[in-house]
Amino acid sequence: MKTRMDWISIAQRIQAIAQTGISYSQNAYDLERYTELAEIAAGMMAGEEAEAVALAKELFAAERGYGTPKVDVRAAVFQDGRLLLVREAEDGGWTFPGGWADVGQSAAESVEREVREESGYEVKAVKLLACWDRNKHGHPAIPFHAFKLLFLCELVGGAAAVSVETTEVGFFGEDEIPALSLTRTLPEQIRFAFDSLRNLGGPTVFD
């Protein structure tokens, strides 16, 4: 019996196939079928609520070109053995600072920018700790398939400052972690970050 996450993964794959077909097909009949596939994927993703289906269709329609996973970059930043977290305005949960990688920037440049924008701190990415397939972990579902890159970052300057996306900034010990924004960061990923700090020579992990 397939789980909800199995169906989300299938919907993401159907959407990617539809997106690629709509972008490159020149046959009117094929375009009609690919558009229908995109609508099916939106319905699978959103459930039965008409407004949610319409929003999913709008999100999918904005995507162009060959369908590929998105890239979510996150930073593990430590000060005196305590981990930097930011509180998300959207859901009130805490998370590694980070977000979607920007076109025109490397993943390392993107994570450094995200930390600066969300926390006020200046950092330097020094090691890629992990590359996770978001679908293979316990995150709540989102419309798109995504890879999560976690970088170990060195704190080089700045000062705590919130942004339009964050309401609090703080450093936390391993036994002090507040309620997390599970869409973005999981408890096991926090534990992994602290384990990585204790074993700086360890390899990058991936799914």
Image (spheres, rainbow, N blue to C red):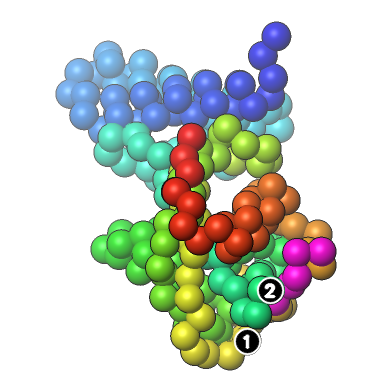
Which residue bears the numbered disc 2?
82
Q: Mark number for residue 203?
A: none
* x and y percentages locating residue 75 in the rendered image: 52, 65
Indicate the amino acid at tag 1: Ala
In front of the other: 1 or 56 = 1
Q: Residues within 10 Å of mark 2 (few under 14, many from 20)?
A: some
Tell me: residue 89, above or below residue 12. Answer: below
- Residue at 58 percent of width and 63 percent of height: 197
Segment tinted magenta in the rendering: 171-175
> Among all residues in the image, which is located at the extreme top?
1
SS of the residue under disc 2? strand
* x and y percentages locating residue 184 in the rendered image: 62, 53
- Residue at 37 percent of width and 42 percent of height: 63
Q: Residues within 10 Å of mark 1 (few under 14, many from 20)?
A: some
Tell me: residue 204, above or below residue 68. Answer: below
The secondary structure that dominates the magenta segment is loop
Residue 53 seen from this side: no
Indicate the amino acid at tag 2: Arg
Quarter where residue 24 is shown: top left
SS of the residue under disc 1? loop
Which residue bears the numbered disc 1?
160
